[in-house]
Image (spheres, rainbow, N blue to C red):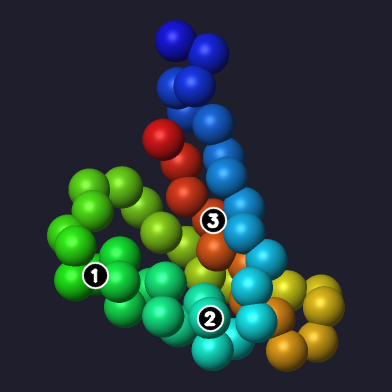
Amino acid sequence: MEWENKLYQLLLPKDEAAEVARDWAERNIESDLRLRKAKTWGHIVIETRT
């Protein structure tokens, strides 16, 4: 139960974040995926909850 409703964040370069988003869509994974601009130049933060 301790894993429920946890927020996971990944900091990735833009090109790698695009690959993760594409893979997520192709696999039809049933959880939300949020992409946002990171403070680190040239990177994207990917957020998901379990």
Residue 49 in the image, given as x and y percentages of width and height: 46, 41
Q: Which circle marks residue 47 in the picture?
A: 3
Residue depicted at 42% across the width and 72% down the height: 20
Answer with left or right where residue 29 lies relative to residue 13: left
* Residue 37 appears in view: no
Q: Please name the amino acid that badge 2 sits on.
A: Glu
* Residue 25 appears in view: yes
Q: Which circle marks residue 13 in the picture?
A: none
Answer with left or right where residue 26 lies relative to residue 5: left
Pick the quarter of the image with the C terminus.
Answer: top left
Pick the quarter of the image with the N terminus.
Answer: top left
User: Where is mark 2, residue-wise?
Assistant: 16
How far separated are the C-alphas under marks 1 and 3?
15 Å
Name the secondary structure under disc 3. strand
Give neighbour class at mark 3: few <14, some 14-19, many 20+ (Cα, 10 Å): some
How far separated are the C-alphas under marks 2 and 1?
14 Å
Residue 12 in the image, given as x and y percentages of width and height: 64, 73
User: Where is mark 1, residue-wise?
Assistant: 25
First in residue order: circle 2 vs circle 1: 2
